[in-house]
Image (spheres, rainbow, N blue to C red):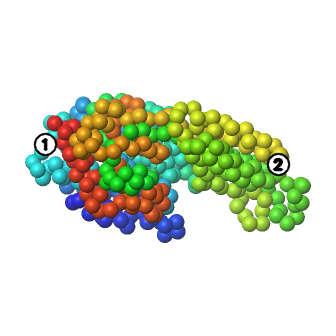
Amino acid sequence: MTATGLLDEIDGVGRDRGRGGYSRHAFDAAEGELRTWFAERAQRLGLAVETDRNANIWAWWGTPGPDAVVTGSHLDSVPGGGAFDGPLGVVSALDAVEIMQCKGFRPVKPFAVVVFAEEEGGRFGVPCLGSRLLTGAIDADRARSLKDPDGVTLAEAAAKAGHDPERFGADPESLARIGQFIELHVEQGRGLIDLGSPVAVGSTIIAHGRWRFAFSGQGNHAGATLIGDRHDPMLPAAEVVAAARRLARATGDGRATIGRLVPNPGGTNAIASTVELWLDARIPGDDRTRTLVAELSGLAKEAADAEGCLVEIAEESYSDTVTFDPALRDRLSGWLGGVPELPTGAGHDAGILAAHVPTGMLYVRNPTGISHAPEEFAEDEDVDLGAKGLAKVLEHLST
Ligand code: HGY
Ligand code: MN
Ligand code: MN
């Protein structure tokens, strides 16, 4: 089954009628359906499927072992996300295995296709949760107590989906088995459009992180409360939204986003008592991201004071700049006929693993250049070129 055929098979899973696009999040029904689909598809290829202690799925071609060639990505999405971010890497890996099997190739090294859990952090807020747990990059107790917007903890959701949350935690055995990790991903930008190439190899991931700003004031009546008597947390929140853009623009190449803002109680005729917002900040070069956040935090406190409100600011996740293994990057590019190298502003499980094992990324052209939105797209022929290119590099690595 080709990568495009596999994508068609899951096209209807987790469609979000309200937002558009897909909403597939850790341990929800749609993601559970995708887990079952992946296991069934992998078993049809003769792969042995197992779920590790952190709910990541491993499909082994042959006996699991050290120095394994591992490829894969994630199946979860952002709320209202596109069809390709994550799934393209998974279906291309399955297609690549079938391409290699059809030509009679058998890997000399252990080989696995992996699906990491909750890469987007779309439900529990911390991105690359499965690969962070695997590598010990997040404390297991903190992970277990992460809450979704309805107040359900990761531990509760995982248990309900049949996983044992008490097993969450660093998994040095699984990590030690990985010899090299290659992730294919739809491009999340316009690089390949401008370069006129269907495929590229990844060079770097810029530093990025997420911070929660919680403003608290005094809830009150929208009509009976004079402006001078208000302590409205929406005001400092609004100033942070505007200041984030201003500060990011001033850096030249920085990005700051507030895509999620939650007033409480959220009534049209009620002054909010609290407003929470989450900042996603990303700037090439270490420390620049945290410098922007420090400046923004100062402005947030000033704005809160001016309105007689309080603010709590907490870092929820942070990743320094990732540089993919240069030797592996050059080998990948050579095997693909000298394709371009692309930096990215998007985080990936490959970025988490890069601190531990030689890691590389392949990108497939996205003619809209849009991602984390329903317009995200990849042409069938580029998807096919990506899967074939992945098969080629995996074969080289597995020999
Ligand atoms: O948010 C990101 O950078 C990635 O798409 N998870
Ligand atoms: Mn994404
Ligand atoms: Mn992704």
Residue depicted at 73% across the width and 38% down the height: 298
The residue lying at 29 percent from left, 36 percent from top is: 330
**Front-lying residue, 329 or 166:** 329
Give the x, y percent position of residue 172.
Answer: 36, 30
Q: Is residue 308 left or right of residue 193?
A: right
Q: Is residue 17 left or right of residue 97?
A: right
- Of residues 40 and 248, the one nearer the viewer is 248
How far apart are the alpha carbons under marks 1 and 2? 67 Å
Out of 322 and 252, give the one closest to the viewer.
Answer: 252
Residue that appears at 50% across and 34% down: 320
In the rendered structure, are the residues bearing label 1 and label 2 in contact, judged by CB atoms less than 8 Å apart? no
Which sits earlier in the primary sequence, circle 1 or circle 2?
1
- Residue 235 is labelled as none
Furthest residue to the front? 195
Question: Looking at the picture, which amino acid does disc 2 mark?
Answer: Glu
Left or right of 262, for residue 65:
left
Whether residue 367 sits left or right of residue 6 in the image: it is right
Mark 1 lies on residue: 106
- The residue shown at (74%, 66%) is 268
Decide: is 18 above or below 328.
Answer: below
| Residue that carries the numbered disc 2 in the rendered image | 307
Residue 242 picture location, percent across and down:
69, 51
